[in-house]
Amino acid sequence: MDLHILFLYSVVAFFYVISPGPAVFLAITNGLVHDMRTVTTSSFANILGLFILSSISISGLGIILLTSATLFMIVKIVGAGYLIYLGIKQFKSASSLKLKKDENIKIEKSLKKTFLESFFLAVTNPKPIIFFIALFPQFLNLKSNITPQFFIMTGIFMFFSFFSLCIYGFVAKSARGLFKKQNFMTWFHRITGGIFVGLGFSLLQIKNTQN
């Protein structure tokens, strides 16, 4: 694989990954409300979901998904519904969660729940499938073996995703002291709840690129 092409792909993937989205806001929430173990678990679940989506895309199933209006709509509705559900959860937490004065927060959800939450969020988001199908062919050398190129490109994407989510979570955790008062946390949950709901509705606006 040409190093220049690989570098160009890495730049595109990096800026795509660090742009705010559902996974980023979930990482920020986990960092602020829970701890880094929760953030890393969530981040790992996210990249596992991305690997599955990438595999679906490269195997040809992604094309089937994009060319089937019904399947694409089902994925959009499920993904949007889950984002809206997370937003409602944030609104419900707005008036009930209060940080302790010593800044230690009781972890209220298990790592298993954290993992499943992030994994489901990743695999029900059609945007990565569109990204993989639209961009992968632009950087692949079709005269060479596709398999190693797939693993390299997917690995780069997963690497950026994992560490960017961990950094977002760490920054949020480090800023926890700014949110010691209940009023700050109440507004944080309201704002993030609104963001998740907004992202859910925006997901419904994604159009099938093949139609």
Image: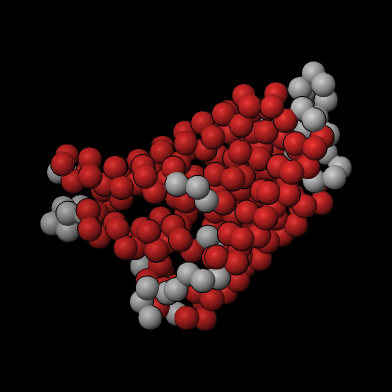
Residue 67 percent across, percent down from the top left: 40, 78
Residue 63 percent across, percent down from the top left: 37, 71
- The quadrant of the image that shows the C terminus is bottom left
With respect to residue 85, does 107 lie above or below?
Answer: above
Q: Which of the 4 image quadrants contains residue 4? A: top left
Q: Among all residues in the image, which is located at the extreme top?
A: 102
Residue 62 percent across, percent down from the top left: 40, 67
Q: Is residue 121 visible?
A: yes
**Pick the front one: 128 or 181:** 181
With respect to residue 45, does 99 lie above or below?
Answer: above
**Pick the front one: 188 or 203:** 188
Q: Among all residues in the image, which is located at the extreme right?
A: 96
Q: Is residue 122 left or right of residue 110?
A: left
Residue at the (83%, 25%) spot, across then down = 100
Residue at the (80%, 30%) spot, across then down = 181
Q: Is residue 187 left or right of residue 29?
A: right
With respect to residue 70, does 77 lie above or below?
Answer: above
Residue at the (86%, 42%) spot, across then down = 96
- The quadrant of the image that shows the N terminus is top left
Residue at the (61%, 31%) spot, across then down = 172
Q: Is residue 38 visible?
A: no
Q: Is residue 210 left or right of residue 84?
A: left
Residue 98 percent across, percent down from the top left: 83, 34
